[in-house]
Image (tube, rainbow, N blue to C red):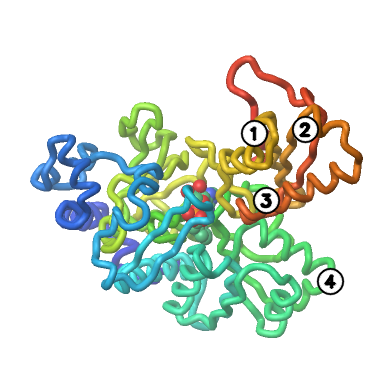
Amino acid sequence: MGNYFQPEIETASREQILAWQNERLVKQVQHVWDNVPYYRKKMEEKGLTPADIQGVDDLKKLPFLTKDDLREAYPYGLLGKPLSDCVRIQSTSGTTGKRVVAFYTQHDIDLWEDCCARAIVAAGGTKDDVCHVSYGYGLFTGGPGLNGGSHKVGCLTLPVSSGNTERQLQFMTDLGSTILCCTPSYAAYLAESIHERGLRDQIKLKAGIFGAEAWSEKMREDIQNSLGIKAYDIYGLTETSGPGVSFECEEQTGMHINEDHFIAEIIDPETGEVLPEGSKGELVFTAITKEAFPLLRYRTRDICVLTRKPCSCGRTHVKMSKPMGRSDDMLIIKGVNVFPSQIEQVLLEQGYPANYQIVVDRVNHSDTLEVMVEMTPENFSDSLAKVTSMEKKLVDALKAMLGIYAKVRLVAPKTIARSEGKAVRIIDKRKI
Ligand code: DLL
């Protein structure tokens, strides 16, 4: 049987979980109706009032919320509490126009940290552990979420944040980190660095809590073998607070969704129809305890499967598979959300034609991004030095827009294959 942070909740009966969900959903719909005019209008357009939602069975009547709604309502349009009651914002890695800003009351933070604490305890964490948090801190939810969860468990928390590998390794060896929290690609990179420096015998890691981007079972196996740890998946998104919406237990066969805080549905991304358990489709979340950013039926765009097969850990909360892809064109590269339209905007602003191709790959467990773009016929005759400086300018502009490095390759006019249908702009070679 597993280790629990809140056993009475994590192993509650299905009936008990449903009872909580029914009660909290009714309350939450009323809260949103009273305080979020943007969503109230959406309900009114469907002829709904809070009285139409008596429990989980009525959830399907409610309108969806999408990232477009978040953009339209940016920044305050979906707030459920006065700003004076909010104590924090966090944000996605997207840039202007794509940024999602989420708000939190102190109560929201408290519940979010409980969710992260559950994940840490499920990975074997106790107050005797040294929890090394290498997710980014700041606007990104990874660092703050796991940091808060680690405090709740009572671990010695190392808020190392991402980057600066030497410092990571020094803390890890000097202070005896036992649990590593970071993206799986960063874990793979750290593992490689540990081996290169011959430090394998000096690290005490026993578990890793890795998420924020897709990773394969093969990658799990490699990291586990290389570091001698058990690697656990964790999922979440800024819109639903951050990491900890779901997490893996010792069975490592999917992530338990914290159903006392979130109601999960799987829908057909084309029709919006709710699909039966076991179907593959888009994951939709309704947050039933969040005060400041109470999203109802939020479409995550992540494609998953849900299962209620009993789990050997004893947890009763539904499990989601690893996300198997997305129903929009968002790419997650090195944990950063990248929309192809952002790249196109930079290219057009810099005077390039819209003939480009984005190639994403994974080399040694680390994502790479290459942007191939055709030169204009005028530029094509320029000297090599001029072309190199144009490439450099584009690298800088892309870095400023995306926040990550993209290799740029300027190619001759008409080199990139034209398509008769939709242009093939993205080649994602990562085998997930
Ligand atoms: O990535 C929150 C997070 C931080 C999760 C740390 C886990 C650990 P966003 O930046 O808003 O939030 O990105 C959310 O990332 O819709 C998924 O597409 C993807 N994602 C998150 N976790 C996983 C995972 C954070 N375990 C988007 N596996 C989500 C695959 C994941 N994809």
Q: Which residue is mark 4?
A: 197
Mark nearer the N terminus (1 vs 2): 2
Q: Is mark 1 within 8 Å of ligand 1?
A: no
Say what amino acid the circle numbered 1 marks.
Answer: Ile
Using the image as rendered, state which of residue 425 and residue 325 is in the foreground.
Answer: 425
Residue flagged by tag 2: what amino acid is it? Answer: Met
Mark 3 CB near ligand 1 (8 Å cut) = no
Q: State the residue position of label 1.
A: 426
Q: Amino acid at mark 4?
A: Arg
Residue 333, position as x, y percentages in the image: 63, 49
Compare marks 1 and 4 and give the one earlier in the sequence. 4
Mark pair 1, 3: CA separation:
19 Å
Contact between marks 1 and 3 (CB within 8 A): the answer is no
Q: Which mark is residue 397?
A: 3
Occupied quadrant, residue 182: bottom right
Where is 249 relative to 105, above or below? above
**Residue on which disc 2 sits:** 375
Residue drawn at the location 76% of the way across and 43% of the way down: 408
Outermost residue on the left side: it is 51
Report the side of 10 relative to 408 (left or right).
left
| Residue 314 visible at all | no
